[in-house]
Protein backbone atom coordinates (compact mmCIF):
# COMPACT_ATOMS: atom_id res chain seq x y z
CA UNK A 1 0.00 0.00 0.00
CA UNK A 2 3.12 2.22 -0.20
CA UNK A 3 2.83 3.21 3.46
CA UNK A 4 6.40 2.18 4.29
CA UNK A 5 9.54 3.51 2.67
CA UNK A 6 12.99 1.99 2.94
CA UNK A 7 16.16 3.67 1.72
CA UNK A 8 18.38 3.79 4.80
CA UNK A 9 17.73 1.14 7.46
CA UNK A 10 19.07 0.92 11.01
CA UNK A 11 19.81 -2.33 12.85
CA UNK A 12 20.33 -2.98 16.54
CA UNK A 13 19.90 -5.76 19.08
CA UNK A 14 18.53 -6.00 22.59
CA UNK A 15 18.47 -8.71 25.23
CA UNK A 16 15.03 -10.10 26.15
CA UNK A 17 14.86 -12.08 29.39
CA UNK A 18 13.87 -15.72 29.02
CA UNK A 19 11.46 -17.58 31.26
CA UNK A 20 14.39 -19.28 32.98
CA UNK A 21 16.70 -18.15 35.76
CA UNK A 22 20.46 -17.97 35.24
CA UNK A 23 20.77 -19.51 38.72
CA UNK A 24 19.38 -22.74 37.23
CA UNK A 25 22.27 -23.01 34.79
CA UNK A 26 24.59 -26.00 35.22
CA UNK A 27 28.18 -26.13 33.98
CA UNK A 28 29.51 -29.02 31.90
CA UNK A 29 32.10 -29.72 34.60
CA UNK A 30 29.39 -30.05 37.26
CA UNK A 31 27.31 -32.28 34.95
CA UNK A 32 30.21 -34.75 34.74
CA UNK A 33 30.65 -34.74 38.52
CA UNK A 34 26.93 -35.21 39.09
CA UNK A 35 26.81 -38.02 36.53
CA UNK A 36 29.51 -39.94 38.40
CA UNK A 37 27.77 -39.31 41.72
CA UNK A 38 24.37 -40.54 40.46
CA UNK A 39 25.85 -43.63 38.85
CA UNK A 40 27.63 -44.49 42.12
CA UNK A 41 24.40 -44.00 44.10
CA UNK A 42 22.44 -46.20 41.67
CA UNK A 43 25.04 -48.99 41.97
CA UNK A 44 24.93 -48.70 45.76
CA UNK A 45 21.13 -48.91 45.85
CA UNK A 46 21.14 -51.97 43.58
CA UNK A 47 23.71 -53.68 45.79
CA UNK A 48 21.68 -52.83 48.87
CA UNK A 49 18.48 -54.19 47.33
CA UNK A 50 20.18 -57.41 46.18
CA UNK A 51 21.72 -58.02 49.63
CA UNK A 52 18.38 -57.61 51.41
CA UNK A 53 16.59 -59.82 48.86
CA UNK A 54 19.00 -62.65 49.67
CA UNK A 55 18.39 -62.20 53.39
CA UNK A 56 14.63 -61.88 52.81
CA UNK A 57 14.48 -58.79 55.00
CA UNK A 58 12.25 -55.83 54.33
CA UNK A 59 14.11 -52.59 53.79
CA UNK A 60 13.03 -49.40 55.53
CA UNK A 61 14.03 -47.60 52.33
CA UNK A 62 11.88 -47.27 49.20
CA UNK A 63 14.61 -48.51 46.87
CA UNK A 64 12.52 -48.55 43.63
CA UNK A 65 11.49 -44.92 44.16
CA UNK A 66 15.04 -43.85 45.00
CA UNK A 67 16.31 -45.63 41.90
CA UNK A 68 13.62 -44.12 39.69
CA UNK A 69 14.44 -40.58 40.80
CA UNK A 70 18.16 -41.00 40.28
CA UNK A 71 17.80 -42.70 36.90
CA UNK A 72 15.45 -39.94 35.76
CA UNK A 73 17.88 -37.26 36.89
CA UNK A 74 20.81 -39.10 35.30
CA UNK A 75 18.94 -39.26 31.98
CA UNK A 76 18.33 -35.52 32.08
CA UNK A 77 21.97 -34.88 32.90
CA UNK A 78 23.01 -36.92 29.85
CA UNK A 79 20.52 -35.01 27.68
CA UNK A 80 22.04 -31.75 28.89
CA UNK A 81 25.55 -33.03 28.15
CA UNK A 82 24.49 -33.97 24.63
CA UNK A 83 23.10 -30.47 24.05
CA UNK A 84 26.30 -28.83 25.31
CA UNK A 85 28.44 -31.15 23.16
CA UNK A 86 26.34 -30.38 20.06
CA UNK A 87 26.66 -26.65 20.73
CA UNK A 88 30.40 -27.10 21.16
CA UNK A 89 30.72 -28.73 17.76
CA UNK A 90 28.74 -25.92 16.12
CA UNK A 91 30.93 -23.35 17.86
CA UNK A 92 34.08 -25.26 16.88
CA UNK A 93 33.13 -25.22 13.19
CA UNK A 94 32.59 -21.45 13.31
CA UNK A 95 35.82 -20.81 15.21
CA UNK A 96 37.72 -23.13 12.88
CA UNK A 97 36.51 -21.17 9.86
CA UNK A 98 37.56 -17.87 11.49
CA UNK A 99 40.93 -19.38 12.44
CA UNK A 100 41.59 -20.51 8.87
CA UNK A 101 40.60 -17.07 7.55
CA UNK A 102 43.05 -15.38 9.95
CA UNK A 103 45.83 -17.72 8.83
CA UNK A 104 45.05 -16.96 5.19
CA UNK A 105 45.07 -13.20 5.80
CA UNK A 106 48.40 -13.50 7.64
CA UNK A 107 49.87 -15.58 4.84
CA UNK A 108 48.73 -13.11 2.20
CA UNK A 109 50.07 -10.14 4.16
CA UNK A 110 53.42 -11.87 4.52
CA UNK A 111 53.53 -12.49 0.76
CA UNK A 112 52.65 -8.85 -0.02
CA UNK A 113 55.04 -7.23 2.46
CA UNK A 114 57.73 -9.85 2.87
CA UNK A 115 57.38 -9.55 6.64
CA UNK A 116 55.71 -11.76 9.18
CA UNK A 117 52.57 -10.26 10.79
CA UNK A 118 53.14 -8.70 14.20
CA UNK A 119 51.52 -9.99 17.35
CA UNK A 120 50.63 -13.46 18.49
CA UNK A 121 49.79 -16.15 15.97
CA UNK A 122 46.09 -17.16 15.86
CA UNK A 123 45.27 -19.93 18.33
CA UNK A 124 43.61 -23.05 16.96
CA UNK A 125 40.14 -23.68 18.46
CA UNK A 126 39.41 -26.62 20.73
CA UNK A 127 36.66 -29.07 19.76
CA UNK A 128 36.10 -30.27 23.34
CA UNK A 129 33.43 -28.72 25.60
CA UNK A 130 34.73 -26.17 28.08
CA UNK A 131 34.24 -26.82 31.78
CA UNK A 132 32.22 -23.60 32.10
CA UNK A 133 29.89 -24.32 29.16
CA UNK A 134 26.37 -24.29 30.57
CA UNK A 135 22.87 -25.61 30.08
CA UNK A 136 19.90 -24.22 31.93
CA UNK A 137 18.35 -26.75 34.30
CA UNK A 138 14.94 -25.05 33.93
CA UNK A 139 15.05 -26.09 30.28
CA UNK A 140 14.11 -29.62 31.36
CA UNK A 141 10.64 -28.18 31.98
CA UNK A 142 10.69 -27.04 28.35
CA UNK A 143 10.61 -23.35 29.26
CA UNK A 144 12.83 -21.45 26.83
CA UNK A 145 15.37 -24.27 26.30
CA UNK A 146 17.16 -22.28 23.57
CA UNK A 147 17.95 -19.28 25.80
CA UNK A 148 21.51 -18.52 26.93
CA UNK A 149 23.25 -16.56 29.66
CA UNK A 150 24.06 -13.16 28.15
CA UNK A 151 25.60 -9.95 29.38
CA UNK A 152 23.07 -7.16 29.92
CA UNK A 153 23.11 -3.71 31.51
CA UNK A 154 21.97 -5.43 34.74
CA UNK A 155 24.68 -8.08 34.66
CA UNK A 156 24.38 -11.62 33.31
CA UNK A 157 20.86 -12.95 32.67
CA UNK A 158 19.20 -15.87 30.88
CA UNK A 159 18.14 -14.19 27.64
CA UNK A 160 17.37 -14.16 23.95
CA UNK A 161 18.96 -11.68 21.54
CA UNK A 162 16.25 -9.70 19.73
CA UNK A 163 17.25 -7.99 16.47
CA UNK A 164 15.20 -5.18 14.93
CA UNK A 165 15.50 -3.36 11.61
CA UNK A 166 13.79 0.03 11.34
CA UNK A 167 13.55 2.73 8.71
CA UNK A 168 13.97 6.47 9.22
CA UNK A 169 10.33 6.71 10.33
CA UNK A 170 11.05 4.32 13.25
CA UNK A 171 8.87 1.60 11.71
CA UNK A 172 10.07 -1.97 12.25
CA UNK A 173 10.56 -3.50 8.82
CA UNK A 174 12.39 -6.68 9.86
CA UNK A 175 13.43 -8.61 12.92
CA UNK A 176 13.89 -11.92 14.71
CA UNK A 177 15.38 -13.36 17.89
CA UNK A 178 17.89 -16.10 18.63
CA UNK A 179 20.30 -17.30 21.32
CA UNK A 180 23.46 -15.64 20.00
CA UNK A 181 25.04 -13.47 22.67
CA UNK A 182 27.16 -11.53 20.16
CA UNK A 183 25.74 -9.23 17.47
CA UNK A 184 28.68 -9.60 15.09
CA UNK A 185 27.10 -12.43 13.10
CA UNK A 186 23.64 -10.84 12.92
CA UNK A 187 24.18 -8.04 10.40
CA UNK A 188 23.58 -10.02 7.22
CA UNK A 189 20.69 -11.98 8.75
CA UNK A 190 19.02 -8.80 10.01
CA UNK A 191 19.23 -7.13 6.60
CA UNK A 192 17.90 -10.30 4.96
CA UNK A 193 14.90 -10.28 7.33
CA UNK A 194 13.46 -7.22 5.54
CA UNK A 195 10.86 -8.40 2.98
CA UNK A 196 11.80 -7.49 -0.59
CA UNK A 197 8.25 -6.30 -1.20
CA UNK A 198 8.92 -3.24 0.97
CA UNK A 199 11.34 -1.75 -1.53
CA UNK A 200 15.05 -1.15 -2.07
CA UNK A 201 17.57 -0.70 0.75
CA UNK A 202 20.28 1.83 -0.01
CA UNK A 203 22.32 1.79 3.21
CA UNK A 204 22.35 -0.39 6.35
CA UNK A 205 23.59 1.27 9.54
CA UNK A 206 24.88 -0.48 12.69
CA UNK A 207 27.16 0.22 15.64
CA UNK A 208 30.63 -1.18 16.27
CA UNK A 209 29.28 -4.43 17.75
CA UNK A 210 28.50 -5.60 14.20
CA UNK A 211 31.82 -4.67 12.61
CA UNK A 212 33.69 -7.32 10.63
CA UNK A 213 35.16 -7.45 7.15
CA UNK A 214 32.85 -10.35 6.31
CA UNK A 215 29.77 -8.35 7.30
CA UNK A 216 30.84 -5.48 5.05
CA UNK A 217 31.42 -7.87 2.16
CA UNK A 218 28.11 -9.70 2.66
CA UNK A 219 26.03 -6.52 2.62
CA UNK A 220 27.95 -5.00 -0.29
CA UNK A 221 27.34 -8.14 -2.36
CA UNK A 222 23.61 -7.56 -1.82
CA UNK A 223 23.96 -4.12 -3.41
CA UNK A 224 23.63 -2.29 -0.08
CA UNK A 225 26.06 0.24 1.37
CA UNK A 226 27.16 -0.77 4.90
CA UNK A 227 27.79 2.01 7.41
CA UNK A 228 29.39 0.48 10.48
CA UNK A 229 31.24 2.11 13.33
CA UNK A 230 34.73 0.61 13.41
CA UNK A 231 35.33 1.47 17.09
CA UNK A 232 33.80 3.58 19.82
CA UNK A 233 34.34 7.24 19.01
CA UNK A 234 36.37 9.17 21.57
CA UNK A 235 35.16 12.54 22.82
CA UNK A 236 36.40 15.56 20.84
CA UNK A 237 38.07 13.31 18.27
CA UNK A 238 36.35 14.58 15.11
CA UNK A 239 38.85 17.34 14.23
CA UNK A 240 41.84 15.09 14.95
CA UNK A 241 40.39 12.39 12.69
CA UNK A 242 39.85 14.82 9.82
CA UNK A 243 43.30 16.44 10.09
CA UNK A 244 45.12 13.09 10.25
CA UNK A 245 43.12 11.47 7.50
CA UNK A 246 45.25 9.35 5.15
CA UNK A 247 44.31 7.35 2.04
CA UNK A 248 42.69 4.18 3.33
CA UNK A 249 44.13 0.82 2.34
CA UNK A 250 42.24 -1.53 4.64
CA UNK A 251 38.54 -2.28 4.94
CA UNK A 252 38.47 -0.68 8.40
CA UNK A 253 40.32 2.38 7.11
CA UNK A 254 37.88 2.87 4.26
CA UNK A 255 34.95 2.56 6.65
CA UNK A 256 36.50 5.16 8.97
CA UNK A 257 36.79 7.55 6.04
CA UNK A 258 33.18 6.93 5.09
CA UNK A 259 32.01 7.69 8.63
CA UNK A 260 34.11 10.86 8.81
CA UNK A 261 32.54 12.20 5.61
CA UNK A 262 29.64 14.61 5.89
CA UNK A 263 27.21 12.26 4.15
CA UNK A 264 28.26 9.04 5.91
CA UNK A 265 28.49 10.65 9.32
CA UNK A 266 25.09 12.28 8.83
CA UNK A 267 23.47 8.93 8.07
CA UNK A 268 25.15 7.19 11.02
CA UNK A 269 24.01 9.86 13.50
CA UNK A 270 20.40 8.95 12.78
CA UNK A 271 20.91 5.51 14.33
CA UNK A 272 20.40 6.75 17.89
CA UNK A 273 17.15 8.51 17.01
CA UNK A 274 15.65 5.61 15.05
CA UNK A 275 16.32 2.06 16.25
CA UNK A 276 17.32 2.76 19.86
CA UNK A 277 14.04 4.57 20.76
CA UNK A 278 12.11 1.63 19.28
CA UNK A 279 13.59 -0.71 21.88
CA UNK A 280 12.96 1.87 24.59
CA UNK A 281 9.28 2.03 23.67
CA UNK A 282 8.90 -1.76 23.45
CA UNK A 283 10.64 -2.52 26.74
CA UNK A 284 10.04 0.48 28.99
CA UNK A 285 6.70 1.83 27.75
CA UNK A 286 4.99 -1.38 26.62
CA UNK A 287 6.68 -3.47 29.32
CA UNK A 288 7.79 -6.22 26.94
CA UNK A 289 10.71 -7.50 28.99
CA UNK A 290 10.06 -11.25 29.10
CA UNK A 291 8.21 -12.95 26.19
CA UNK A 292 6.60 -15.81 28.13
CA UNK A 293 5.22 -13.57 30.87
CA UNK A 294 3.60 -11.36 28.23
CA UNK A 295 1.94 -14.38 26.63
CA UNK A 296 0.58 -15.58 29.95
CA UNK A 297 -0.68 -12.08 30.75
CA UNK A 298 -2.60 -11.93 27.46
CA UNK A 299 -4.20 -15.29 28.14
Image (cartoon, rainbow, N blue to C red):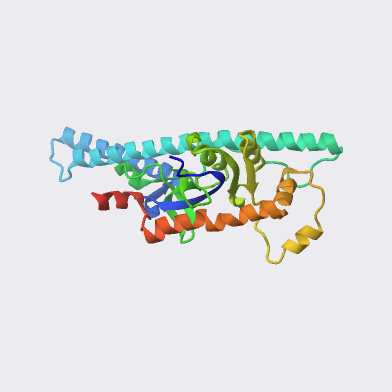
The picture places residue 96, in percent across and down from the top left corner, at 61, 34
For the point 80% across and 54% down, which residue is it?
245
The reply to whether residue 20 is visible in this rendering is no
Q: Is residue 58 left or right of residue 230?
A: left
Question: Which residue is farthest right?
Answer: 114
Q: In this view, does 10 lie to the left or right of 24?
A: right
The picture places residue 197, in percent across and down from the top left corner, at 48, 35
For the point 16% across and 35% down, which residue is it?
55
**Which residue occupies the foreground of this view, 259 or 12?**
259
Residue 234, quarter of picture: bottom right
The picture places residue 105, in percent across and down from the top left corner, at 74, 36
For the point 54% across and 42% down, which residue is it?
186
For the point 77% across and 58% down, which residue is it?
242
**Which residue occupies the foreground of this view, 152 or 166?**
166
The reply to whether residue 151 is visible in this rendering is yes
* Number of numbered discs overlaid on the protein picture: 0
Vertical arrangement, residue 186 with respect to residue 23, above or below: above
**Which residue occupies the foreground of this view, 231 or 124?**
231
Amino acid sequence: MNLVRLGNIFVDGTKIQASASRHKAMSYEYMKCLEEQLEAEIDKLLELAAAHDEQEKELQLDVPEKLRRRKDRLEKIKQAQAVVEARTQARYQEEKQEYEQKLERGRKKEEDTGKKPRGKAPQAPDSAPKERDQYNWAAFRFTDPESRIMKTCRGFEQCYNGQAVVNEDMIIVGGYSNAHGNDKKEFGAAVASVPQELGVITAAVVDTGYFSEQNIKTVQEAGIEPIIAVAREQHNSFLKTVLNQQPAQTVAGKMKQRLSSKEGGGIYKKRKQTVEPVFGIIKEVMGFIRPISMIHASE
